[in-house]
Amino acid sequence: MSKHPNDEKLITYKLVVVGDGGVGKSAITIQFVQKMFVTDYDPTIEDSYFVHSEVDGIWCILDVLDTAGQEEFSAMREQYMRKGDGFLLVYSVTDPQSFANISHFYTQILRVKDRDAYPMLLVANKVDLLHLRKVSEEEGRELAAKWRIPYIETSAKDPPLNIDAAFHEVVRIIRDQTSRERNPNKKSRNDGKWTKRKPPSARRCVIS
C-alpha cells in the first residue's frame, strides 16, 4: 500500500448510500469507515463520513453519506442526489419490498441528474442470512443487467463480505465516467452512456 499524499492533492468523491430503512445502509457504511459491525443506530439520522482510501493504487478522499430511508425523509432525497458523484443502491435480500422499492431510487437519481445513466452500484445486502433470503442472486443480477450497472452481494456482519469492494467499485465507475467525458471513444465499464438526456422526441433509450 502506497503512502497517500497531502489532502489538497487528493480528489474527493461524494458517495451516497440509498435504499429503504432497515436494509443495512448504516451497517455497511460504518463497517467501511470504522471497520466494525453495529446493530444499534438511529435509522432516521443522515450521517456523513470522510475517509482516505486507496483504489487501484490511487489515493482519494471519500465523502460517504449514509441516508435515512424512511419515507418521511423522502423530501430530502433530491438534495443529496444532486450532490452525489456516485450511488450505492442497497436492498436487503431478506426483504422483497426493499428490492422492489430500489427502482424508485434509481429512477429518481436519473431524473434529478437529468441523465440516461449515472455511476451506480446495485448492492444486495445481508447475504449472510441464508435461511431468511427471499431475493435470489439471479433476480439481483437481472435487475442490474437491465439497468446496465454492476451488481455485488455484501454482508456487514463480521467477517464482512465485499464492503470495501462495493465502495471501491463505485469510485472506479466515477473515474470511468470522467475518463469517458474526456475521451468519448473510450469503452465504458458498464456500457452505460454518461450523457445528458436528449429531448424525448430524439432520445434513444440506452437502459435495457
Image (tube, rainbow, N blue to C red):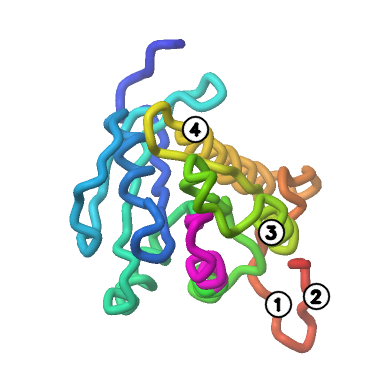
Q: Amino acid at mark 4?
A: Leu
Mark number displayed over residue 204 = 2
Q: Earlier in the sequence, mark 4 or mark 2?
A: 4
Q: CA distance from mark 1 to mark 4?
A: 39 Å
Locate the C terminus by quadrant.
bottom right
Q: Amino acid at mark 2?
A: Arg
Q: Which residues are magenta?
A: 89-103
Q: Nearer the viewer, mark 1 or mark 3?
A: 3
Find residue 150 and report its horizontal and vertical position in percent: 65, 48
Q: Nearer the viewer, mark 1 or mark 2?
A: 2
Mark number displayed over residue 198 = 1
Q: Earlier in the sequence, mark 3 or mark 2?
A: 3
Secondary structure type for disc 2: loop
Q: Amino acid at mark 1?
A: Lys
Q: CA distance from mark 4 to mark 2?
A: 38 Å
Residue picked out by circle 3: 139
Secondary structure type for disc 3: helix
Q: Earlier in the sequence, mark 1 or mark 4?
A: 4
Mark number displayed over residue 161 = 4
Secondary structure type for disc 1: loop
Along the viewing direction, whichever of 176 and 153 lies nearer the viewer = 153
Q: Amino acid at mark 3?
A: Glu
Q: Are marks 3 and 2 in contact (CB under 8 Å)?
A: no
